[in-house]
Amino acid sequence: MRDVKETLEEHYSKKETYSPDEKKIIMDRLDEERRIHQEAVKGLDGKNVSYSETEKSKILNKLNEERISIQNRLEIKKRRLENKEIYRFATKVFYKFLHMEREYFIEIDDCEKFSRRPAIISLYYRTFEELKKKDVLIKTEVYSDKIFISYDAIRVYFKAYSLEDKRKV
């Protein structure tokens, strides 16, 4: 049997084009080698190949919890940024914060940088001549659709703010 396989390998290694039957033989051989290699790796790892019903249910529950967590985060992010009033100044596009000490605007591109870790992001405010910029610490929380802002990076005190919703016509 071994001699036949060696002669087949020598025969096929010299050819450049193959018939459909020859391709099938080659693919079956490669598939068999791959399966043998996979079985050997599984044997070396010492991992269980089959799981009990309780293990399966635990794994499925964990995967389901992760899926729900990701889905909740995406829904909150969507609520935080969807249907908000858009302002344009020159070539930049902004959202406006509500109930702040003055009218602060944030670039829409900067909204993608929100995370649970505080980050320094520039907010803009209008004066008579131009838009001025102020750097603040911004973070978000998983449980809230608000954006938490600290005006001072040294003395950190976060307050929750939301973006202005679109006006109904």
Image (cartoon, rainbow, N blue to C red):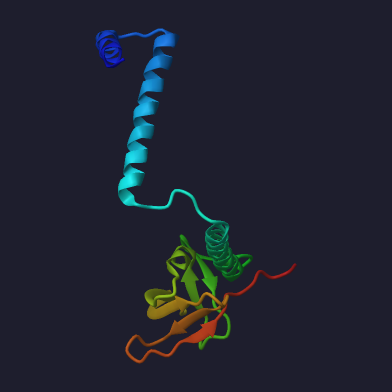
Question: Which of the 4 quarters of the picture holds residue 85?
Answer: bottom right
**82 or 131, nearer to the observer:** 82
Image coordinates of residue 121 in percent, x first then y, are: 39, 74
Residue 131 shows up from this direction: no
Farthest residue to the front: give it.
Answer: 1
Which residue is at a point 64% across and 65% down the rendered structure image?
Answer: 83
Which residue is at a point 49% across and 74% down the rendered structure image?
Answer: 105
Which residue is at a point 35% across and 92% down the rendered structure image?
Answer: 155
The quadrant the N terminus occupies is: top left
The quadrant the C terminus occupies is: bottom right
Image coordinates of residue 63 in percent, x first then y, are: 53, 60
Above or below, 139 against 34 in this view is: below
Which residue is at a point 40% across and 77% down the rendered structure image?
Answer: 132
**13 or 162, nearer to the observer:** 13
Q: Is residue 19 left or right of residue 79?
A: left
The number of discs equals 0
Residue 101 shows up from this direction: yes
Farthest residue to the right: give it.
Answer: 169
Image coordinates of residue 20 in percent, x first then y, are: 44, 10
Above or below, 35 against 144 in this view is: above
Above or below, 87 against 149 in this view is: above
Image coordinates of residue 6 in percent, x first then y, are: 25, 14
**69 or 57, nearer to the observer:** 57
Q: Is residue 109 left or right of residue 85?
A: left
**161 or 14, nearer to the observer:** 14
